[in-house]
């Protein structure tokens, strides 16, 4: 919504789990923060909201604000971000969500302009990729000490592929998934993408990989090949083109 210039239509926001994208910081600062995590129904009602937009199913789950049906009875319409709640989401699915929000708030021209710019940015990145490349083997590392929490067929799989990589766990038919360290080592990634968020810093995650008896044997770790990607860029949203650029530069720095 901020990317579409809709901050004046927002009576509140909640559950910030990553730093705000710098170009949108000024717009974000205009929006009241209702809660550090999910707001209560009372907070939403007191804010005067008549529309609630959730990025994840949990927003409308038991620990969330309430079900869509409950909220509709209170006169609050709902929208669940489609792309972040499906397997194998694509850029087109992101564009669909942008169009839906733009249509709801009657700023269709802004939505199409944003999609056009994202498409152009992605095409410019892809034009710089090596033409005769063999896609790099990539491990997406979210977290994990005993096992590895990584990307299966979620949006990171799409981002890595578009950026000229091959997600080594792209054959796993789930979104985020847990795999063994041994499996990660056997598939031997050439690059590790670090998802950056929360209390554990990207540098701490890298240090863990370098010191883990098993994972330090991966080619990517031996060669110190890490790409750091903010969680909000890794998610199914308006930073997708930027994410692809970050990944491509990390995969093929000599081409950028």
Image (spheres, rainbow, N blue to C red):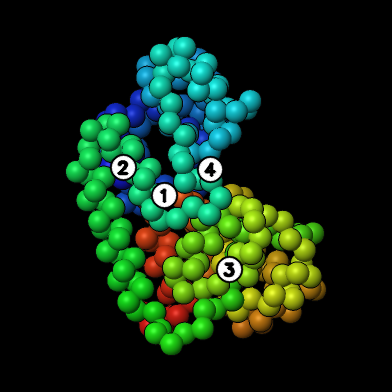
What residue lies at 39% left-to-right and 68% top-to-bottom?
Answer: 245
The relative height of residue 245 versus residue 99 in the rendered view (above or below) is below
What residue lies at 50% left-to-right and 67% top-to-bottom?
Answer: 160
What residue lies at 55% left-to-right and 72% top-to-bottom?
Answer: 166
Mark sitting on residue 137: none
Q: Could you classify mark 2 by the number of other residues whose Cα lies within 10 Å: few (under 14), some (14-19), or many (20 or more)?
A: many
Q: Could you say which is closer to the camera, residue 144 or residue 36?
A: 144
Q: Could you say which is closer to the camera, residue 70 or residue 242?
A: 70
Q: Does the CB distance between marks 3 and 1 fall below 8 Å?
A: no
What residue lies at 33% left-to-right and 38% top-to-bottom?
Answer: 100
Q: Residue 122 at x, y = what percent?
A: 34, 65
Sequence-first disc among 2 and 3: 2
Alpha carbon of mark 4 to alpha carbon of mark 3: how far? Answer: 20 Å
Mark 2 = which residue? 99
Mark sitting on residue 85: 4
Q: Residue 134 at x, y = what percent?
A: 51, 83
Alpha carbon of mark 3 to alpha carbon of mark 1: how far? Answer: 20 Å
On the rendered image, what quadrant is the C terminus found in?
bottom left
Q: Is 250 on the left or on the right of 119, as rendered?
A: right
Q: Could you classify mark 3 by the number of other residues whose Cα lies within 10 Å: few (under 14), some (14-19), or many (20 or more)?
A: many
On the rendered image, what quadrant is the N terminus found in?
top left
Q: Is residue 135 visible?
A: yes
Mark sitting on residue 93: 1
Sequence-first disc among 4 and 3: 4
Q: Could you classify mark 4 by the number of other residues whose Cα lies within 10 Å: few (under 14), some (14-19), or many (20 or more)?
A: some
Alpha carbon of mark 2 to alpha carbon of mark 4: how far? Answer: 17 Å
Sequence-first disc among 2 and 4: 4
Mark 3 = which residue? 167
Q: Could you say which is closer to the camera, residue 102 or residue 228?
A: 102
Alpha carbon of mark 4 to alpha carbon of mark 1: how far? Answer: 11 Å
Q: Residue 217 at x, y = what percent?
A: 74, 79
């Amino acid at each position: 919504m901020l990317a579409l210039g809709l901050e004046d239509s927002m009576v509140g926001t909640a559950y910030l789990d990553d730093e705000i994208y710098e170009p949108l910081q000024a717009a974000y600062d205009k929006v009241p923060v209702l809660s550090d995590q999910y707001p209560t129904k009372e907070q939403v009602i007191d804010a005067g909201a008549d529309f609630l937009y959730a990025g994840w199913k949990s927003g409308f789950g038991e620990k969330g604000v309430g079900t869509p049906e409950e909220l509709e009875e209170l006169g609050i319409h709902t929208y669940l971000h489609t792309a972040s709640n499906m397997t194998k989401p694509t850029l087109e699915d992101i564009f669909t969500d942008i169009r839906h929000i733009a249509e709801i708030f009657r700023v269709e021209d802004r939505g199409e302009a944003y999609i056009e710019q994202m498409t152009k940015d992605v095409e410019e990145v892809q034009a710089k990729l090596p033409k005769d490349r063999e896609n790099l083997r990539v491990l997406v590392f979210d977290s994990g000490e005993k096992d590895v929490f990584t990307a299966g067929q979620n949006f990171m799989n799409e981002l890595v592929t578009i950026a000229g990589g091959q997600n080594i766990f792209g054959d796993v038919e789930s979104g985020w998934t847990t795999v063994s360290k041994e499996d990660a080592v056997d598939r031997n990634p050439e690059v590790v993408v670090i998802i950056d968020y929360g209390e554990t810093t990207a540098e701490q995650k890298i240090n863990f990989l370098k010191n883990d008896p098993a994972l330090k044997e991966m080619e990517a770790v031996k060669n110190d090949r890490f790409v750091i990607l903010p969680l909000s860029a890794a998610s199914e949203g308006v930073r997708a083109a930027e994410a692809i650029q970050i990944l491509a530069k990390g995969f093929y720095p000599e081409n950028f």
